[in-house]
Image (tube, rainbow, N blue to C red):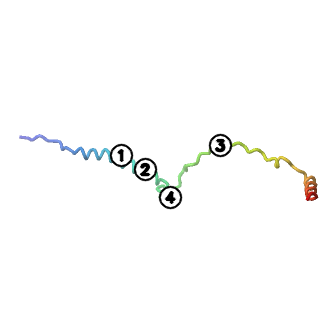
Amino acid sequence: MAQKKRKKKSSWLKTLLFVILTPLIIWGLAFVLWFYWKDITGLTGREDKNPATKANRQVDRPTPPPDKASRERINEEDRRKLEEILKDRK
């Protein structure tokens, strides 16, 4: 008489480890690739066609109040006269 074929029972522990470890290994490899991506691409000797650029942020900064000294323009003659007056006071 023919015997019935029985399915092999895999242990539930092996299945559980497979389900837990497979995503962890894949995530770990993805992290290592992400972390060392510049080093990995540097090994190929090719330059990136589209290198990452920093975003140009334009910040509205308030303009500093103009200095009073820069607004006042003194003629050369007036400056000499003022220097003479200051010398005389000393």
Residue closer to the observer: 16 or 3: 16
Which residue type carries mark 4?
Answer: Gly
Q: How many marks are shown on the rendered structure?
A: 4
Which residue type carries mark 1?
Answer: Pro
Residue closer to the observer: 3 or 60: 60
- The residue beneath circle 1 is 23
Q: Closer to us: mark 3 or mark 1? A: 3
Task: Give the mark, 2 or 1, whose residue is nearer the N terminus.
Answer: 1
Percent position of residue 85, x then y: 93, 55
> Marks 4 and 2, Cα distance to the nearest angstrom?
22 Å
Provide the secondary structure element on which disc 4 rests: loop
- The residue beneath circle 2 is 31
- The residue beneath circle 3 is 59
What residue is rendered at 33% in x and 47% in y?
A: 22
Percent position of residue 62, x then y: 70, 42
Q: In the rendered image of this protein, does residue 45 appear above or below residue 60? A: below
Percent position of residue 13, x then y: 25, 46
Task: Give the mark, 4 or 3, whose residue is nearer the N terminus.
Answer: 4
Is residue 76 shown left or right of residue 38? right
Is residue 64 shown left or right of residue 8? right
Q: Closer to us: mark 4 or mark 3? A: 3
Q: Closer to us: mark 3 or mark 2? A: 3
> Marks 2 and 1, Cα distance to the nearest angstrom?
12 Å
Provide the secondary structure element on which disc 1 rests: helix
Q: Label 3 crowding class (10 Å Cα cut-off): few <14, some 14-19, many 20+?
A: few
Provide the secondary structure element on which disc 3 rests: loop
> Marks 4 and 1, Cα distance to the nearest angstrom?
32 Å
- The residue beneath circle 4 is 45
